[in-house]
Structures are given as C-alpha cells and as structure tokens.
Amino acid sequence: MTPEFSLIERFFTRPAPSATLGVGDDAALFAVSPGMELAVSTDMLVAGTHFFPDVDPRKLGWKTLAVNVSDLAAMGAQPKWATLSLALPEIDEIWLGAFAEGFFQCANQYGVELIGGDTTRGPLNLSVTIFGEVPRGQALRRDRAEVGDDVWVSGTLGGPALGLAALQSRASLENDALQQCVQALEQPWPRVELGLALRGIAHAAIDISDGFLADLGHILERSRVGANIEFDALPAHAALVPKIGSSQIKQCVLAGGDDYELCFTAPAGQREAISAIATQLGLGLSRVGCIVPGDSALVLDASGNPLSIERTGYDHFA
Amino acid sequence: MTPEFSLIERFFTRPAPSATLGVGDDAALFAVSPGMELAVSTDMLVAGTHFFPDVDPRKLGWKTLAVNVSDLAAMGAQPKWATLSLALPEIDEIWLGAFAEGFFQCANQYGVELIGGDTTRGPLNLSVTIFGEVPRGQALRRDRAEVGDDVWVSGTLGGPALGLAALQSRASLENDALQQCVQALEQPWPRVELGLALRGIAHAAIDISDGFLADLGHILERSRVGANIEFDALPAHAALVPKIGSSQIKQCVLAGGDDYELCFTAPAGQREAISAIATQLGLGLSRVGCIVPGDSALVLDASGNPLSIERTGYDHFA
C-alpha cells in the first residue's frame, strides 16, 4: 500500500452508513431514495485564490465542505454524500489531521457522509463534489423568478468581505468587529434548513458566494428579468453599519462575496409564510426589492436614485 | 457576468438531455433509473505529477475524462454524467478550446454528459467526478475475490510506462514502438464494455492505474486473500516483448501504471464465458494466475521461482 492510500484511510475513512459502499473501491455506491432527484454540485478551492496558505487547517476543512453544502441549500436539497480530492505539496500529518477534523465537523453538522476521494501531490487544491436529494420537480432553480416577485436575502451581507479586507490591511476594524467578520469569513453556516423550508414557496434561489449583485445577476439572466433593489433594505453585517455611508462598505454589502446566505425570489402572497420561516429558524430574512421586466439590477438609495456600482462581484481572473 | 462564467458557458456547456438540469445552476439535477445504484468516482490530475505541462491539451482533455471512466468500468457501471473542475493559471482560449474538444470526444465515445463544474485561477489542476449506473447489488467490487478464482487482465500492460520512460529519456525506443507507447500513455481506452459484460461473471475487479501489482494488491487487501501470478502469462505490450528479460521492462509490466486495463478475478467455471466475451469484444483477456490463501501477490518466473520486485506501483509522494 502506498503512503497516499494509507493517508486517505487514516484521515478520511469514516463510516458511511447510508451508502452501499464508501471510501476504498474504484467508485462509491449509493441508492437514491424513491421519488427523489439527485442534486450535484462541485467547488474547487485553491491556496492563494480562495484562502491564505497559512489559514487554520481546521477552519479550512470546515469551509471546504461548507461552500459546497451552500450550493445544495440554494437548490432546496438535503445534503447527503460528498467526495473530496486533495492536491498536497507534501504530507503534513498535523495539517491533515486538523483539516480532516474541520471537514468532518461540518459533515456531522449537515449530515454529509464522505464516500470517496483522491489524494495526489501538487500545489494545494481542495475539490469537493457534493450530492443531495430533492423531491422531483421541487428544486429551487435560478431560472424561475417572475416579474412581481419579492427579492429576499437571508442573514447579513458584507461581514466576510470586510474581514478579508481587514486581513489584507485594506480596512481597519475594532477588535470585536474584526473577530466577528473574520469568523464569518472563515466559518460560514450554509442555510440548508432555509432551503428546505423554501420548497414550494420560493420561485428562484441562489447562494451568495461571489457577491450579492453578481449572484442575483445569475437569477436575472437565467430568468430573463430585472430587479429593483433598495440599498437601505439590504441586511448589512453589524460591523458594517457604523460606516455604511462609505464606498468601501457599500461594496462589501453589494459585491463582497463569501456570504453564503441565500438570495431568493417569491410571490408577494408568500410574505407571511416567509416571516413564519424566519421566526421558526431564528434567522433574519430581509425583503430587499422586487423583480421587474428587464435584464439587470438597479440599486436605489433612500431617495430612489440609482447607486453607482464599481463592480458586482469577485472575479478570479480579474 | 464574470469572465470565468462566460468561460464555462463557452467551452463546456453542451446539452445534457438525460439530466433534469445541467451546467448553469447551483447544482445539476438528475434522476437515477429505477433499480439502479449510482456509482461515483473522482480523480484529480495535476500538471507535473500526472502529465507534462506542455502536453497536447486535446489529448489531456481525453485522458482527464478517460481515467474517470475507467474507474466506472472497473465497477461494471455504465458511465452517464460528469462534473469538471478546472484550476487554470491564466485564460488561454486556444488551450481551453482544444482541451474541451478532447474532453467531449471522450464524453461522446462513452456516452457521458457534462452536467456541472467550477473554474478558478490557480496552478493547473483538473478534477473530474463521474457518475454511472449499475443494477443494485451487481457492481464489481474489490472485496469479493475468493480463493480458487482465476486472475485475469485485459489488453496489454507496460506500454504507457515505457512511453513515459522514453519521453523522460529513461528508455530508448524505435520510432514505431515509441509512437505506440506514447499513444497508449496519452489516449487510454477505458474498458467499459468489458466491465458491463463481467457483471455476474467476475467476483472482483479493479482498473490498473497505479501499476498491476499495486492495483491487484488492493483486491487482495480488501478481499483478504493472496495471489500467485505467472510473469510469462502477463500480456506485455508488443513494444516490450523484444526486451522482456530486462529489469526495466519487467517493472513496466508489473508496476508501470497508466494502463487503464481491468484486472479481475473469476471462478474457473467462468473461463468459457470469459473467452466468449474476449471474442465478442475483440479484446485480449489473459489468465495470469490464481487467488490463494494469504495476503500478498507472488510473481513466479517460468521455472516457478519468485521474481524480485523493486516496487509495486506509482507513489505520488515518493
């Protein structure tokens, strides 16, 4: 047995009771429940692009799985299984142990079983594919927004982006605020319960990973509609509120990314149902605008005048 | 829309008629056929570890998918869907176009639909997750070999390893032989039809990616058995036959890797059925030894003496 195989076995083999066959064969085997469709998503995280190479591996392990869980949350799917491929520059057992611990903390939190993967030598790269179940025809898609829908956002926006800016010395923050924003950046909590609750209520949904306007833009493009957004209705993270007038803070809210909240649209007739979900989950749900005819989003200030937007989201190749 | 999204759309969006939803949402959606289990495998290819950075991108595209298809072949599963995550150092449209062309050539050859993926900036890394269907309980696993089984190998061994050695100036080859070996290295043909035909016939199976002895070793370990292998029965690639006595050539056959043939075990009572499959598929199937009590493989020369083995397979971290 080569070291890479013993690596996988040692750090990443856990029971996968809901699979027929987990880690250790050419492929994993599992059956999809009757009446369910499989929802599949994949995200690749690269050192230097998505995270600092010296980030706490425990937090990195959590986030590596969490960003994938978030994609299933946005579909209204129940996460169930995942594969993990790792390219590692070297074998560092302490790092691997901590990474695996964080990964499985997130897996346990969201009921995900690791069923397979691959380990190889190369510049640090973490690639997860995640599988979830959703009743046929009930997935929350990007292409179902309708003119007249409300636009909603869960939780708060901009904290992770401001935390990143502070870590990169592009912003200064008080101690408490810094800690909150960095925590939000490093340990996102995907909105799986919200996604499940929104089945049959929301028309369209997406998770906010690249920035609110960029991700809303995907809904608009796929649904062939526009949106009017009230900036003051957007739920800025508490650490941003004192400086909400600044251009940098506005950018964090509108285009910061890494929020892993859900943006969704729903008919006005669902407002009460959505309020009830917010209460039930103890999660803020903010109505931030409405879907209109058109092909893009207009962000309006308190006077109803359009805000000028520098950029709509994060671009890895910019 | 950011350039990375237009990249994905431009090069990697093709119709996925058997999926409910393909590329372009938070997750893809598909239904698994009644009575079927899903077989899932993932492989990550890294520049410098798995391929030369300057390899023809068309051939790289083929191989990136093919090595994943091969894992499903080894399970007796029918490949159906795949996701592709790419980390790219820069946007090179000519390279991407050629890579996509090779990838979809392989996808078309094996009936695989690309249903999702991710593109990001980083050192060149290609990560595929592949999904196939297999009737419940009929998958070819590693842990089902039984004492008394024959050990079989499809096609030929060692050609890709010798081709790699020649490209690295560790071996010299005549023109024709060089071309054959490099072709075998760069464009493997996964044995999907063989895997499907072996359902209900083979006890255990694996694809030979890390080297015959290493991969056979996985069957032995998982099945808790040993094996006696006759070196002379192993199907060496034609280019290796003239120098079969040399230590390097023996290593190519036994431990070269990148063969993407199937190694499988089956009861002696299936020999006729297996011969019929070989004829039907026009594919050589060689009986190379037998499963015995124990925990490792013994390779015997023509006199029945054990061969000394330098290494059993490829280790990325060695």
Image (tube, coloured by chain):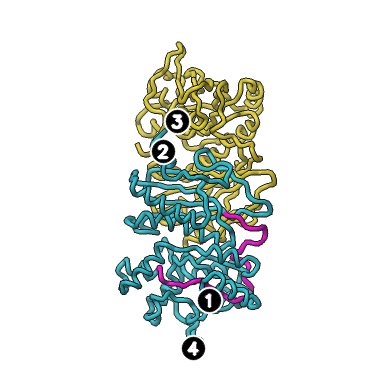
Chain colours: A cyan, B yellow
For marks 2 and 4 on the same chain, the one whose residue lies earlier in the sequence: 2
**Residue A149 on the magenta span:** yes
Amino acid residing under circle 2 = Ser
Residue at 40% in and 68% down: A160
Q: Which residue does the numbered mark 4 point to in the structure image?
A: A303
A246 vs B159: above or below: below
Give the quadrant of residue B133: top right
Q: Secondary structure at mark 1?
A: strand
Q: Secondary structure at mark 3?
A: helix
Q: Residues within 10 Å of mark 2 (few under 14, many from 20)?
A: few
Q: Which residue does the numbered mark 1 point to in the structure image?
A: A286
Cα separation between marks 1 and 4: 20 Å
> In x, y percent, where is residue A261?
50, 67
Kindly identify which chain the residue marked by label 1 belongs to.
Answer: A
Q: Is residue A95 left or right of residue B145?
A: left
Give the residues drawn in magenta, as a range.
A132-160
